[in-house]
Image: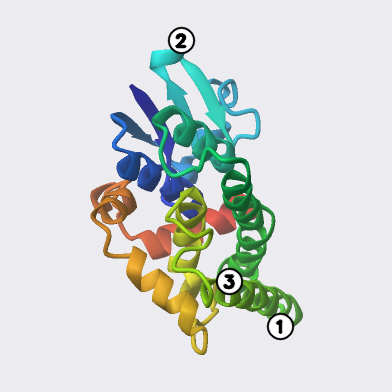
Amino acid sequence: MIELLTSETPNGWKISIALEEMGLPYTWRHIKLSEREQKQDWYVALNPNGRIPTIIDHDEGDFAVFESGAILIYLAEKAGKLLPRDLKGRSRVLQWLMFQMSGIGPMMGQANVFYRYAPEKIPYAIDRYQREVHRLFEVLDRQLARHEYIADDYSIADIALFPWIHGHEWSGVTLEGLDHLRRWHDAIAPRPAVQRGLAVPSKADLGDKTQQTVEATRKFLA
């Protein structure tokens, strides 16, 4: 059984979506970022970086895995799903997974900080990160003009990217004019496993997400 330690962020939803898509049995625990639970000693012992998500594979001697990209690879290999086994196919998926980890995630994270959370609005910073996010979206749009999914077949690369693209409005970035990216997003969003994954944590656990998220993040950054 997989235990997922997670919260209401794109990186957290990556893993709950993957678990649902792969059909792996799991339980989950809501790590309350506003209470800095991710910085408690017991959690840092599992995840040295003090971030979410983390999984514990109780079938493998309580083996802990942190970093969302590493977790996706681990789960795909465990389930034998959503990651090709041939050398080239596997490489294509991992290239786009790394694109999300090194580009989309960090740049959207910075856009979120300056657009939503910073107590002082700095136009240069907001514009700089929103423009870079849009540039990265254009990279995806060009790829999706030639492929149904980001690396041909639906894979952990799509799962890694989807929660971030799904939250584009939170970064203040539009999908206008990115018809292929929009088509891809709209094809993935209604998948039953995706909808179930996006519900972890459930809305009942979140309360007023928008206001809580802004206030908690501003407190954390301070």
Q: Name the residue under label 2.
A: 61
Give the residue pinned by disc 1. 123
Q: In which quarter of the image is residue 123?
A: bottom right
Residue 74 x/y as whole percent: 51, 31
Q: Nearer the viewer, mark 2 or mark 3?
A: 3
Count residues near mark 3 (Cα–Cα under 10 Å), then give few for <14, some for 14-19, many for 20+.
some
Q: Which of marks 2 and 3 is nearer the N terminus?
A: 2
Can residue 222 be spotted in the picture? no
Badge 3 amino acid:
Gln
Disc number lying in front (2 or 1): 2
Q: How crowded is mark 1: few (under 14 residues within 10 Å), some or many (20 or more)?
A: few
Q: How far apart are marks 2 and 1 (CA)?
A: 50 Å
Q: Determine the CA span between mark 2 and mark 3.
A: 40 Å
Front tag of 3 and 1: 3
Q: Are marks 2 and 3 in contact (CB under 8 Å)?
A: no
- Amino acid under label 1? Pro
- Callout 2 crowding tier (Cα within 10 Å): few <14, some 14–19, many ≥20: few
Residue 159, x across and y down, in percent? 45, 53
The amino acid marked with disc number 2 is: Gly
Mark 3 lies on residue = 143
Horizontally, is 109 left or right of 58 in the view? right
Question: Judging from the image, what secondary structure is the residue with disc 3 in?
Answer: helix
Q: Are marks 3 and 1 in contact (CB under 8 Å)?
A: no
